Amino acid sequence: MKIARFNRDRLGIVEGDQIADVSAALSQLPTVPWPGKWGDPLIGSLGRLRPLIESAKTTAARVSISSVHLESPVSLPSKIIGAPANFALHIEESKADAAIAASGTIKTIAEHGLFLKASSSLVGFGDGISLRFLDRRTDHEAEFVVVIGSEGSNISEDRALDYVAGYSLGLDVTLRGSEERSFRKSIDSYTVLGPWFVTKDEIVDPDSVRFRLRVNGVTKQDANTRDMLFSVRQLIALASRFYKLYPGDLIYTGAPAGVGQIQVGDKIEVDCEEIGAGVVTVAGT
C-alpha cells in the first residue's frame, strides 16, 4: 500500500497515476489528550486503520497525482535520524572535496555514530526546498528512508524489521560549512520526504533497493541500499540503543556518491521502482 498525505492533510492511497481519497478513515484516529504521547498518531494506528482504509478505498473519489499538493506522508515524527558516511564511495568523494570536508575529518559511520535533524525541517515533495544562505553551497543528498511503526528501545538486529511501518524516499539537504552537521542540515525545508511511503510488505528486502536522483534531467546519484556500510537492521538497532524509537520516527539511511550543489530553479527528481517517483522544486526564501 502506498500512503500519501496531500492537499492540507487529506489521506490518500496511490494507485497508478491517481490518488484515492480515503480521508474518511481518519475519523477513527484516537483522540489524544494533552500533553499527548510522542509519535505520529496515524503511523501508530496504521495496523488498526488499514482495514478501514481498504474499505474506504472502494468508494473513494480519485484524483490525478499531478493535480495535488503532496505533503510529507509522515506529519509528526518525534525525531529524524541521519546516518552519516554510510556509503564507501561517498566517503571517498567527501575526502576529495574540500567543501564537503569543511566541517572536519571525514570518518566512517562506525566512528561518527548517528545524528539528529530538527523535525521542523520536514516537508513534502510538493512543498519544495527554500534555499537560505545563497552565498554558500547547498547540496542534494538522496536517501532511502525507514519509517518506524512501533515504539521500541534496545532492539536487536534480528527483530529490527518488526518495528518498521514502511519505507520512503528523502532528500537530506545540506548547507556546507564548518558548523555542526545537525545545525546545517536542520534548516526549514531541508528534510524532504515522499512522495509517499509504502508499507513494509511492499519491499521484501530493504537492503536491496535501487534509488536514483536527477537534477534538471541529469542523473547525479544512482545507488542501491545493498552498498550501505550499515544495513537497515543495523541502523535501527544502533539508533534504538541511544534513543527510544516512536511511531513515525524517520531514519535517513545515508547518501550515496554523487552529491552536488543545487540552485534556485532546479528540479530534483527522486525515484525508486518499489516506491515511485516525485519531483521537488528548489526556490529561494
Image (tube, rainbow, N blue to C red):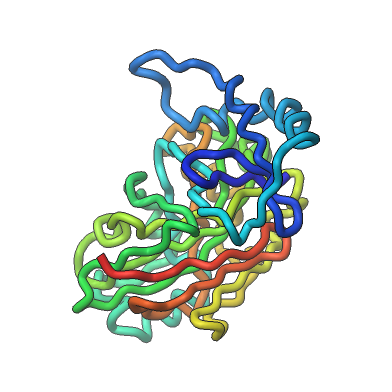
Quarter occupied by residue 22: top right
- Give 270 or 113, whichever is nearer the viewer: 270
Residue 138: % across, % down: 31, 73
> What residue is drawn where x is 37% and y is 80%?
261
- Asked if residue 99 lies left or right of residue 4, the reply is left
Give how far across and how far down residue 74 sits, in percent: 51, 42
Residue 153 in view: no
Residue furthest to the right: 58
Number of marks in picture = 0
Decide if residue 118 is on the left or right side of residue 207.
left
Q: Vertically, is 15 above or below 214?
A: above
Q: Which quadrant, please, contains the C terminus?
A: bottom left
Task: Say which quadrant the N terminus sits in.
Answer: top right
* Figure quadrant of residue 36: top left
Q: Is residue 117 visible?
A: yes
Identify the residue at image location x=50%, y=39%: 9
Residue found 57% across the figure and 68% down from its top: 270
Is residue 189 shown left or right of residue 209? left
User: How far from the left and from the top, in percent, is residue 273?
Assistant: 72, 65
Q: Residue 194 lies in what quarter of the image?
A: bottom right
Residue 6 rendering spot, x and y as whole percentages: 54, 46
Residue at x-position 52% and y-position 57%: 253
